[in-house]
Image (cartoon, grey):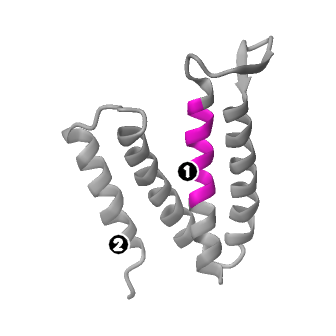
Amino acid sequence: MIYVICAVYLCLSVSGLTFMKLGSLEGAKELLTIPIINMKISGLSLIGYTCYIFSFLLYTYIVTKFDLGIIVPLLAGIVNVLVMIVAVLVFKEKFNIYSCIGVCMIIVGIFLINMKK
């Protein structure tokens, strides 16, 4: 069951970041603006914030169930790789050789951290 919670965390975290970005793009219907920092909030942004809040709540539960030095780098690495994939596919951001090397290093790091002694 804990692995299902980890998967839900990953989905909520990545979708939260994705919706926050989508809500900040030109053309997103603005619901309100925070004047001091001129931050525009749209419906998509609110969906993103909601997903991210729930992902954080799950994260606080997950870190109590695993070794902290294992689970934090593991989840952070997976989130980083998934966000990179979403950035390329959804937002048409550039993916160059350095991005590829970075993603490969993250994946190798995940395997190294989780290797049994």
Give the quadrant of residue 107. Answer: bottom left
Instruction: Answer whether residue 33 is magenta in the image.
Output: no
Instruction: Answer whether residue 14 is magenta in the image.
Output: yes
Q: Quick one: label 1 or label 2, which is nearer the N terminus?
A: 1
Instruction: Say which amino acid is labelled 2.
Output: Leu
Residue sitting at x 22%, y 37%: 96
Give the quadrant of residue 63. Answer: bottom right
Find disc 2 in the rendering and name its residue.
112
Q: Main secondary structure of the magenta part?
A: helix
Give the quadrant of residue 99. Answer: top left
The reply, left or right, for residue 60 in relation to residue 9 is: right
Tally of numbered discs: 2
Image height of 100 relative to 8, above or below: above
Element type where label 1 sits in the image:
helix
Q: Distance between the residues labelled 1 and 2?
A: 23 Å
Residue sitting at x 76%, y 60%: 57
Residues shaded magenta: 11-22
Residue 78: x percent and y percent?
A: 46, 60
Image height of 82 relative to 58, above or below: above
The reply, left or right, for residue 38 in relation to residue 74 is: right
Residue sitting at x 75%, y 46%: 50
Residue sitting at x 72%, y 12%: 38
Find disc 1 in the rendering and name its residue.
14
Residue 31: x percent and y percent?
A: 78, 22
Image height of 51 relative to 32, above or below: below
The residue sitting at the left extreme is: 97
Element type where label 2 sits in the image:
helix
